């Protein structure tokens, strides 16, 4: 008489542990990739970003007549007016903070709770760069958590000037327009080195909603807010 051995199969608990392990390893591998990529960018300029790739695909589907406009220029060849305007508008404490503004994050949290959805992120310049380089435009707390981790990596591996240089060359300024040089050509038919204080203030105000202001350049808010930023520019501290 022959006997048949029963083959034991993993139970649900073991499968859960296995899946958690796989997810954890994948997450760690992703973080290692981000960390290594940022380290390389200390010496190599990013050729693209997550936002640029997403926009390029969108334009190829919806506006094949448009192409991504972007031209990298060194930090020293970008107008100090623009640098001061962006810091005054987006992150007044950029030079001295560690990539986070706790008060701004808490204020954003309270506003999001009152609205029942994410409408504000309280983002510094470094946080904006983290999002632009690697993440999507989707607003979620998971994405915000990943953004904070990448922000820490940027602040750990790069000095402020390099962070700001990459930001100035990567930030979105309109429909397919990325970086200071492309924005200067697109809006003012000039170079980023020759931007005036007034032009720089307007460009800085456009950053939170670049596509909107690209289509509404005569906005009263844009003009009024640019005046405010122009008056604050003198107090903006630049990274050395």
Image: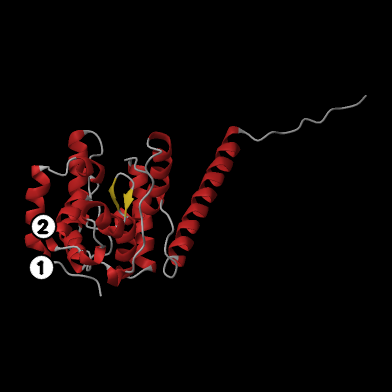
Q: Earlier in the sequence, mark 1 or mark 2?
A: 2
Q: Nearer the viewer, residue 138 or 115?
A: 138
Quarter containing the C terminus: bottom left
- Please give the label number shown on residue 51: none
Residue 17 on image: x %, y %: 56, 42
Q: Nearer the viewer, residue 212 or 38?
A: 212
Residue occupying image coordinates x 20% and y 44%? 213
Name of the residue lying farthest toward the top: 1
Q: Is residue 161 above or below residue 142?
A: below
- Residue marked by disc 2: 229
Residue 48 on image: x %, y %: 42, 54
| Residue 156 lies in quadrant | bottom left
Q: Is residue 6 above or below residue 24?
A: above
Residue occupying image coordinates x 27% and y 56%? 185
Q: Nearer the viewer, residue 147 or 171?
A: 171
Q: Is residue 14 left or right of residue 144?
A: right
Total number of numbered discs in the rendering: 2
- Please give the label number shown on residue 234: 1
Q: Is residue 138 above or below residue 28?
A: above
| Residue 233 lies in quadrant | bottom left
């Amino acid at each position: 008489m022959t006997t048949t051995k029963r083959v034991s199969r993993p139970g649900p608990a073991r499968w859960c542990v296995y899946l958690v392990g796989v997810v954890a390893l994948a997450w760690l591998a992703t973080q290692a990739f981000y960390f290594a990529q940022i380290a390389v960018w200390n010496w190599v300029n990013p050729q693209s970003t997550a936002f640029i790739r997403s926009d390029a695909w969108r334009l190829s589907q919806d506006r094949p007549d448009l192409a991504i406009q972007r031209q990298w220029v060194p930090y020293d060849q970008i107008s100090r007016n623009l640098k001061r305007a962006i810091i005054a508008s987006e992150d007044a404490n950029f030079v001295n903070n560690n990539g986070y503004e706790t008060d701004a994050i808490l204020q954003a949290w309270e506003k999001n709770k009152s609205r029942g959805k994410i409408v504000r992120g309280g983002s510094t310049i470094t946080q904006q760069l983290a999002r632009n380089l690697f993440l999507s435009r989707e607003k979620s707390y998971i994405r915000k958590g990943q953004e904070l981790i990448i922000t820490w990596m940027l602040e750990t591996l790069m000095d402020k000037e390099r962070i700001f240089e990459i930001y100035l060359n990567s930030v979105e300024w309109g429909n397919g327009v990325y970086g200071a040089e492309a924005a200067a050509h697109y809006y003012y038919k000039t170079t980023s080195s020759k931007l005036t204080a007034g032009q720089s203030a307007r460009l800085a105000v456009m950053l939170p909603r670049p596509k909107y202001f690209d289509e509404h350049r005569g906005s009263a808010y844009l003009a009024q807010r640019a005046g405010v930023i122009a008056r604050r520019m003198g107090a903006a501290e630049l990274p050395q």
